[in-house]
Amino acid sequence: MPYGWHEIGQSPASSGAVLQFWGRERNHPAVATAVAAGAKVIMSPANRAYLDMEYDLLTPGGLDWAGAIEVSTAYDWDPATLLPGIPQASILGVEAPLWSETLRTSADIEFMAFPRLVAIAELGWSPRATHDWESFRARLGAYGPRWVRDGVRFHRSPEIRWS
């Protein structure tokens, strides 16, 4: 089964493919057409799920071509309703890419991944009906002391009360 970026959906041979949707747009007719022909989708919209994007304009390292992605931005989207014409049954899951061209060390990677990776994981592993930003913020904040104790370099987002 072929797997590739969502642009392969423009090919007539994509009917059995898995498309990784990385776009920023909220409407993508070529992806919807490929799905109608039998393609499946992995959701990783760059402006929500790309872990190499900056948290804000002051983030050391990272990129900004898809915009800044704070924890709430990474958490506050629904893979099943992001793109019209893509039924939930055609979505295989989510992916949180982390391109490393601006990152040099494991600590750089940890900083860009945490805590957003936890937000993306919750989207992928739990039903939408259980997603609640206030509850998530509290649960995520409880990890702060553990990450500090374990030497994890993470972004201390001002959106989270780190206990």
Image (cartoon, helix red, strand yellow):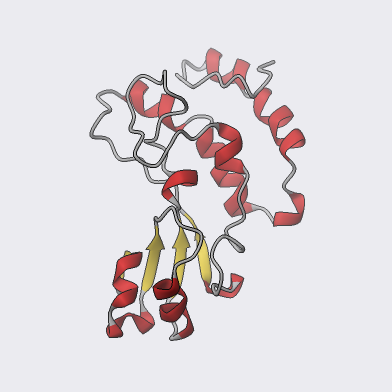
Residue at x-position 33% and y-position 80%: 14
The image quadrant where one finds the N terminus is bottom left
Where on the picture, by quarter, is residue 67?
top left
Image location (x, y in percent) of residue 120: 55, 45
Image location (x, y in percent) of residue 101: 23, 34
> Which is nearer the eye, 157 or 142?
157
Where on the picture, by quarter, is residue 105?
top left
Residue at x-position 45% and y-position 19%: 153
Whether residue 26 is situated above or below residue 18 in the rendered picture: above
Can the viewer see residue 155? yes
Q: Is residue 144 left or right of residue 139?
A: left
Q: Is residue 61 left or right of residue 116?
A: left
Image location (x, y in percent) of residue 71: 57, 33
Whether residue 67 is situated above or below residue 93 in the rendered picture: above
Image location (x, y in percent) of residue 37: 43, 86
Total labels drawn = 0
The image quadrant where one finds the C terminus is top right
Residue at x-position 34% and y-position 39%: 65
Q: Is residue 89 left or right of residue 51?
A: right
Can the viewer see residue 1? no
Residue at x-position 47% and y-position 15%: 151
Whether residue 99 is situated above or below residue 102 in the rendered picture: below
